[in-house]
Image: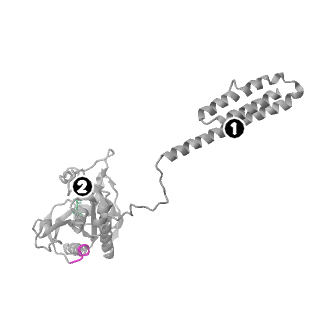
C-alpha cells in the first residue's frame, strides 16, 4: 500500500508538469481525487490495511489528497492569470501616464456671460436664486396669472410629465416661490434652463436659457426698470446703449413691454444683424401684475415692482456673433472656446 501511494505521488508530480490548460487540470483532478480517482480508490481500500499500519498509511493518503487539492487550485489560478495576461497583451493598451494631448475644456460662452451679468446685478444689490427644472403646473402657469383657459398657455409648447408636472417653459415659473420667500422688498435675479417642444433651427432650441429678474418695493416705476436694463446692457456691450420700450403682452405684467436696444453692431445705423432697423429686440419685461403679487402673498395696494425675462441665448449670440443657437448645446469645445473669447 505504502509503495502504491508513493508511486501515485510520483505519477501525480509527473502529470502536473505537463498540464497547461484548465481542461487538463480538471482531468488531472478527476483522475486522482474524482469519484473514481486513484487516490479515492485507495481510500476505499483503506479498511484492508492492517491495524498497525493504519496510522502511517492514513497520514500518507491524506497528505497525498491534500497535495493534489492544493496543486490543482494553484494550477487553476496560474492558468487563469496567464489567460488574462494574454488577453491584456492582445488588447490596445492605455498608458495613463502619457501627457493628455486633447487639451483642457473651456467655459461655454453662456457661462462666461452669465457670470458677468450675475456680477453686475449682485453689485446692484440683487440676490441670485436658482430655479427648478421640473416645476408644478401651478408655478409655471397659474401662479403667474396664466390660468388653464388662458391662450398664452398655447404659445408655449410645453413638455408635460406623466405626473402632471412640466419641464419649466420659462424662468417666470420661479417667481411665486421667490416672491414668497423674499417678501415684498426684494431684488432677485434667477438665471435658468428652460424647455419647450420646439422644432429646431438656427434660432430655436428646445433647451435654452433665460435670465429673469424681479424688483419689488414701494413706488417702483418704469423708469427704474429702464435704468436697470440700461445698466445691464452697458455692462454686456461695454458701452452706453439706448433702449426703447414697445408695448408687449404677457399675462404676468401690466403694462408689458418689449425692450429694444440700439443695435450694438452698427450703433443704430442699420445692418444685416438688426434687419436694417437699427434696433434689436432683447428683453420682454413689464410691471408685475397685481394678481402675481397677490398670489405670492404680497399686497399690491402697498407694493409694486417690475420683472424682466432676458432671452439669454440670443444675447450670447449677438455678443459673440454665433449664428446658430444649436452650437450652444453642442459639445464642440474648439468652437465654444473660440466664441467664448469674444465675450
Ligand atoms: N416668461 C416670458 C417668456 O418666456 C418672458 C418674460 C416676459 C418674463 C415678461 C418676464 C416678463 O418676467 O416680465 O416668454
Q: Which mark is residue 207?
A: none
Residue 2 image position (x, y, % from top left):
82, 29
Left or right of 42 on screen, residue 203:
left
Residue identifier under label 2 = 205
Please tell me the numbered disc located at residue 71. 1
Q: Secondary structure at mark 2?
A: loop
Residue 223 at x, y percent in the picture:
19, 75
The region drawn magenta spans 234-239
Q: Quadrant of residue 245?
A: bottom left
* In the image: residue 138, left or right of residue 103: left
For this orientation, the residue located farthest to the bottom is: 240
Q: Position of residue 178 (x, y in %)?
A: 33, 63
Check mark 1 vs ligand 1: CB closer than 8 Å? yes or no: no
How dense is the environment of label 1, judged by Cα within 10 Å: few (below 14), some, or many (20 and up)?
A: some
Task: Work out which quarter of the rendered image holds the C terminus and state it.
Answer: bottom left
Residue lying at the far right in this picture: please name it.
52
Amino acid at each position: 500500500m505504502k509503495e502504491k501511494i508513493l508511486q501515485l505521488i510520483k505519477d501525480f508530480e509527473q502529470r502536473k508538469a505537463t498540464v497547461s490548460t484548465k481542461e487538463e487540470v480538471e482531468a488531472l483532478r478527476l483522475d486522482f481525487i474524482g469519484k473514481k480517482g486513484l487516490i479515492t480508490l485507495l481510500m476505499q481500500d483503506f479498511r484492508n490495511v492492517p491495524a498497525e499500519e493504519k496510522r502511517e498509511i492514513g497520514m500518507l493518503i491524506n497528505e497525498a489528497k491534500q497535495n493534489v487539492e492544493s496543486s490543482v487550485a494553484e494550477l487553476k489560478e496560474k492558468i487563469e492569470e496567464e489567460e488574462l495576461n494574454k488577453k491584456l497583451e492582445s488588447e490596445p493598451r492605455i498608458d495613463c501616464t502619457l501627457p493628455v494631448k486633447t487639451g483642457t475644456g473651456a467655459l461655454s460662452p453662456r457661462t462666461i456671460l452669465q457670470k458677468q451679468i450675475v456680477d453686475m446685478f449682485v453689485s446692484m444689490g440683487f440676490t441670485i436664486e436658482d430655479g427648478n427644472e421640473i416645476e408644478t403646473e401651478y408655478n409655471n402657469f397659474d401662479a403667474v396669472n396664466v390660468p388653464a383657459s388662458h391662450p398664452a398657455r398655447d404659445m408655449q409648447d410645453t413638455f408635460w410629465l406623466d405626473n402632471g408636472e412640466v419641464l419649466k417653459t420659462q424662468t417666470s415659473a420661479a417667481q411665486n416661490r421667490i416672491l414668497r420667500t423674499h417678501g415684498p422688498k426684494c431684488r432677485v435675479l434667477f438665471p435658468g434652463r428652460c424647455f419647450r417642444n420646439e422644432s429646431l433651427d438656427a434660432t430655436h432650441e428646445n433647451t435654452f436659457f433665460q435670465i429673469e429678474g424681479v424688483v419689488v418695493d414701494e413706488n417702483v416705476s418704469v423708469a427704474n426698470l429702464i435704468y436697470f436694463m440700461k445698466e445691464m446692457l452697458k455692462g454686456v456691450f461695454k458701452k452706453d446703449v439706448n433702449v426703447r420700450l414697445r408695448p408687449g403682452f404677457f399675462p404676468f405684467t401690466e403694462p408689458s413691454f418689449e425692450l429694444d436696444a440700439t443695435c450694438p453692431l452698427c450703433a443704430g445705423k442699420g445692418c444685416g444683424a438688426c434687419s436694417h432697423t437699427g434696433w434689436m429686440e432683447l428683453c420682454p419685461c413689464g410691471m408685475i401684475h397685481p394678481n402675481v403679487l397677490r398670489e405670492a402673498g404680497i399686497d399690491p395696494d402697498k407694493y409694486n415692482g417690475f420683472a424682466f425675462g432676458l432671452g439669454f441665448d440670443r444675447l450670447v449670440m449677438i455678443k459673440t456673433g454665433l449664428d446658430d443657437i444649436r452650437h450652444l448645446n453642442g459639445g464642440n469645445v474648439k468652437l465654444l472656446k473660440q466664441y467664448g473669447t469674444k465675450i
